[in-house]
């Protein structure tokens, strides 16, 4: 069975489970940020283990299920938990769920993550909208034959494609407006993805800062690349769960990352609840 057929099979199962729900907006929740899914009403839950070919999350704080329902009154499909290459998954497996979302009919995704803050002035617990990224994974999920059938619209699915606006300016603008309505400021940042799972050394953080990164994490970038290949619009939101190595007074731990996520997830839920209808309206309108 080809990779494309596996994605189609997974999407078919999900379509059946979702009943008449046709989400145009997808949301991926990062480490410690899972509670956003609690804001989803009329929810249908599908554990990853029940979806054919779907990779299973092995990380604590990533629960591993699809939550589909209404957020702010519009249909959404939420991935509560994601997989990473450091768990031993291949680039194709890491991005399998994003392919499935595309085939389900999703036109925009909100990719959230826990990140270390590199930029001076960032504080722990802050949310930052991604303006751009640096792929420092050492691999690209599109390596191999190009599969044009994954395109969700004309002009997508190309071998070579533009990444100048990997993160949608219009979605970012909506997100910043919405954050203001919710009473907080959403800064913009540049996210650098490392393969992990070890956190960085202070020297690596100094190097990443010199490269132009303001945030560092172990996810999101492969998903963004695959989403853009399909023609899906991307909004990236990082939660600064800790100051990057060498910048804070404490040593880094997964507990710190998860605990900060826990403190911020309600604010993120409020933001996404207000934002989802705006994103849905934006993608319904002609692109
Ligand atoms: N580095 C890499 N990934 C992370 C960090 C970090 O400091 N915090 C949360 N995810």
Image: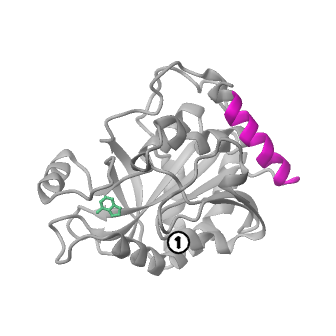
Q: Position of residue 210 (x, y in %)?
A: 15, 49
Q: Nearer the viewer, residue 145 or 134?
A: 145
Q: Position of residue 130 (x, y in %)?
A: 41, 54
Q: Is residue 39 left or right of residue 94?
A: right
Q: What secondary structure predominates along the stretch shown in magenta?
A: helix
Q: Which residues are magenta?
A: 5-20
Magenta stretch: includes residue 9:
yes
Residue occupying image coordinates x 47% and y 78%: 262
The secondary element bearing badge 1 is classed as helix
* Quadrant of the drawing holding the N terminus: top right
Q: Which residue has dot 1 on it? A: 268
**Which corner quadrant of the figure contains ligand 1?**
bottom left
Residue occupying image coordinates x 68% and y 33%: 6
Magenta stretch: includes residue 38:
no
Q: Is residue 238 left or right of residue 104?
A: left
Residue occupying image coordinates x 36% and y 34%: 139
Q: Is residue 175 above or below residue 140?
A: below
Q: Nearer the viewer, residue 92 or 238?
A: 92
Q: Quadrant of residue 248?
A: bottom left
């Amino acid at each position: 069975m080809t990779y494309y057929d596996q994605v189609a099979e997974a999407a078919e199962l999900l379509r059946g489970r979702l009943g008449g729900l046709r989400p145009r907006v997808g949301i991926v929740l990062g480490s410690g940020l899972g509670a956003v899914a609690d804001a989803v009403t009329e929810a249908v839950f599908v554990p990853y283990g029940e979806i054919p070919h779907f990779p299973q999350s092995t990380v604590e704080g990533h629960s591993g299920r699809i939550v589909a329902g209404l957020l702010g009154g519009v249909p959404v499909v939420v991935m509560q938990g994601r997989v990473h290459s450091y768990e031993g998954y291949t680039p194709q497996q890491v991005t399998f769920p994003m392919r499935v979302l595309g085939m389900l009919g999703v036109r925009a995704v909100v990719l959230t993550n826990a990140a270390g803050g590199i930029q001076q002035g960032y504080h722990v617990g802050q949310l930052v909208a991604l303006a751009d990224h640096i792929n420092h994974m050492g691999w690209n999920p599109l390596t191999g034959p190009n599969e044009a059938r994954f395109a969700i619209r004309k002009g997508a699915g190309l071998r070579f494609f533009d990444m100048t606006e990997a993160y949608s300016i219009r979605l970012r603008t909506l997100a910043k407006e919405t954050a203001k309505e919710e009473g907080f400021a959403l800064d913009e940042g540049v996210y650098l993805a490392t393969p992990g799972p070890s956190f960085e050394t202070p020297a690596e953080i100094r190097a990443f800062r010199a490269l132009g990164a303001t945030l560092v994490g172990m996810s999101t970038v492969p998903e963004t690349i695959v989403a853009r290949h399909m023609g899906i619009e991307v909004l990236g939101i990082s939660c600064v769960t800790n100051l990057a190595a060498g910048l804070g007074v404490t040593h880094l731990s997964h507990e710190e990352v998860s605990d900060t996520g826990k403190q911020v997830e309600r604010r993120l839920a409020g933001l996404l609840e207000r934002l989802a209808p705006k994103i849905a309206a934006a993608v319904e309108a002609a692109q």
